Image (tube, rainbow, N blue to C red):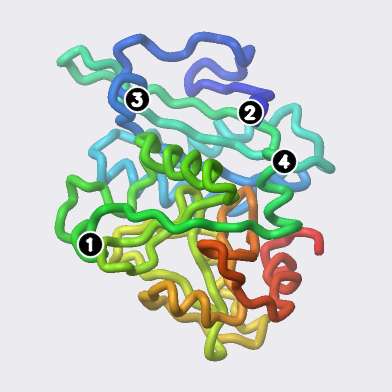
Amino acid sequence: MATRALAVLGRGLLPVDTPIARADDAGLTRGDGVFETVHVRYGKPWQLDEHLVRMAGSARILGIALPPVEELAALVESVLVDAHGDEEVGVKIVCTRGPETGQPEPPTVFATMFDVPPAAQRGRREGVSVVTVSLGVPADVRSGAPWLLGGAKTLSYAVNMAALRYAAETGADDALMLSTEGTVLEAPTATVVWAAGGALRTVPVDTGILAGTTVNYLLDHADELGLRAERTRAHLDDLFAADEAWLCSSVRGAARIKALDGKPIGERGLTAGVQRILGFPV
């Protein structure tokens, strides 16, 4: 994921190797911050408003003073100044709590433009194999424990990245996190969606998962696949019995789950329609 451009709030477009954070910034020392990743197609960020609304919600959960939405949107536009309309890139928007001085400090806010990783494009085209991992908590615990930051997209992604490394060590492309009682939750950087019983389904946010902007858009258009939209809890047996299943995120779109823990998942020819709804070539 090569970084191609950097813009810092209040400073504008800068060389990508410009130092932008202090050594005592809580985003660096504690992972204390929030972020969003936006897909850019034809030079335009897709679902930017929805991402910024979710980012504001994450900031509220952490108690971080996020700058106004208008400033964040302008920051994104500034980092895309050299983006070409015929290419596919992504933008990451980051807001940290700022320096830990004991006094109120403004947050560190910046955006980067990056090339979409080949693995994300390959997963979109070819599908992915997935291995299950335990998140180590019950499905209901985060809704009653705000300090666990359920539903917030934070910079504290060390566990997520460790899950992806574990998946790679087993020969899989991605991981699917389960609760301690076996409820399906989410992937480290994606939301799970499956088709079954005439419905396009995903996991409800009362399990503490991140509300997926891409998934919300997809379920809002489920009728284009001849399906109704449902949010329901599931176990592995539900995915194995599904007509088809995907991992969905902004940058990758929808990657069909080809196998789960080494067992094949159904393929009923729905992926092309899903990709079409999300605006990706099929």
Mark 2 vs 1, N-terminal side:
2
Depth check, front residue: 19 or 133 = 133
- Quick check: 123 left or right of 100? right
Say which residue appears at 18% left-offset and 45% top-offset: 147
At label 4, counting other C-alpha atoms closer than 10 Å, the crowd grade (few under 14, some 14-19, many 20 or more) is few
Image mark for residue 118: 4
Residue 205, horizontal then vertical, whole percent: 34, 65
The disc labelled 4 sits on which kind of residue?
Answer: Pro
Mark 4 vs 1, N-terminal side:
4
Mark 4 vs 2, N-terminal side:
2
Q: Residue furthest bottom?
A: 197
Question: Which residue is under mark 3?
Answer: 27
Between tags 4 and 2, which lies in front? 4
The disc labelled 3 sits on which kind of residue?
Answer: Gly
Distance between mark 4 and mark 2 Cα atoms: 21 Å
Say which residue appears at 53% left-offset and 90% top-offset: 197
Depth check, front residue: 233 or 75 = 233
Q: Secondary structure at mark 4?
A: helix
Between tags 3 and 4, which lies in front? 4
Say which residue appears at 22% left-offset and 62% top-offset: 138
The disc labelled 1 sits on which kind of residue?
Answer: Pro
Question: Which residue is under mark 2?
Answer: 79
